[in-house]
Amino acid sequence: GAVVSQHPSWVICKSGTSVKIECRSLDFQATTMFWYRQFPKQSLMLMATSNEGSKATYEQGVEKDKFLINHASLTLSTLTVTSAHPEDSSFYICSASPAGGNTGELFFGEGSRLTVL
Amino acid sequence: DAKTTQPPSMDCAEGRAANLPCNHSTISGNEYVYWYRQIHSQGPQYIIHGLKNNETNEMASLIITEDRKSSTLILPHATLRDTAVYYCIVRVAGGGNKLTFGTGTQLKVEL
């Protein structure tokens, strides 16, 4: 299947700093990418839909000024957690679907674990 | 997207078939049934999907009832590496359509 890669796979930062997570589709172009967050022992929660060349669409309750999403190309979307705090510590996962795919199969990255001290 | 109901956990002996049920009684005519799994601390992995016909691939088989209100994912010969949370999701096909995850079924494959 298609490959989606995230970087970094894990990051530790101090409270108040900003952290950027990259999501790349390695062998296909994706006009839409999705960002999820997962807390321990919980399911994945959709945070936002990232659209290439336009503003992201955020789910209810997700602060768009805190979680900045940029989808500048058909193979790269970034999530920046601004002024991170310990409660932002979580597993962040992105997914993407090949443009033009007829069944809309989504492929997921390996996830990025953020720990805010 | 229609909601799905899955048992929270199941056990299976290694080498035996694992049959994971999913109820989706409010599924719409244009919604597909997708199955993903998530091994601990990894991103979800696509397994299989179908609309109304039964489907089979190298990983699993998907059996969808005639009324499409429920389905079963079958892992024919479960191994320890199949231990994971399995998610059944119904969704309209199309790359721009999001996947909404429920709580899934924690499958534990044991010796």
Image (spheres, coloured by chain):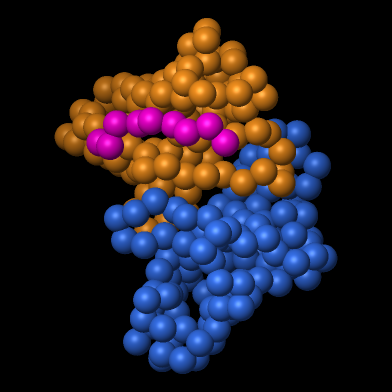
On the image, the x and y values in percent for residue A23 come to: 62, 66
A78 up-or-down from B45: above or below: below
Extreme residue in the top direction:
B66
- Tell me which segment is drawn in magenta: B1-9
User: Where is residue B91, by image quadrant?
Assistant: top right
User: Where is residue B90, by image quadrant?
Assistant: top right
Q: Residue at x 78, y 47 (%)?
A: A99
Is residue A63 or residue B20 the one in the foreground? A63
Residue A33 makes an appearance in the image: yes
Q: Is residue B4 magenta?
A: yes
Quadrant that contains the C terminus of chain B? top left
Quadrant that contains the N terminus of chain B? top right
Q: Is residue B49 left or right of residue A104?
A: left
The blue-tinted chain is A
Is residue B47 or residue B16 the one in the foreground? B47
Extreme residue in the front direction:
A60
Residue B34 makes an appearance in the image: no
| Shown colour of chain B | orange
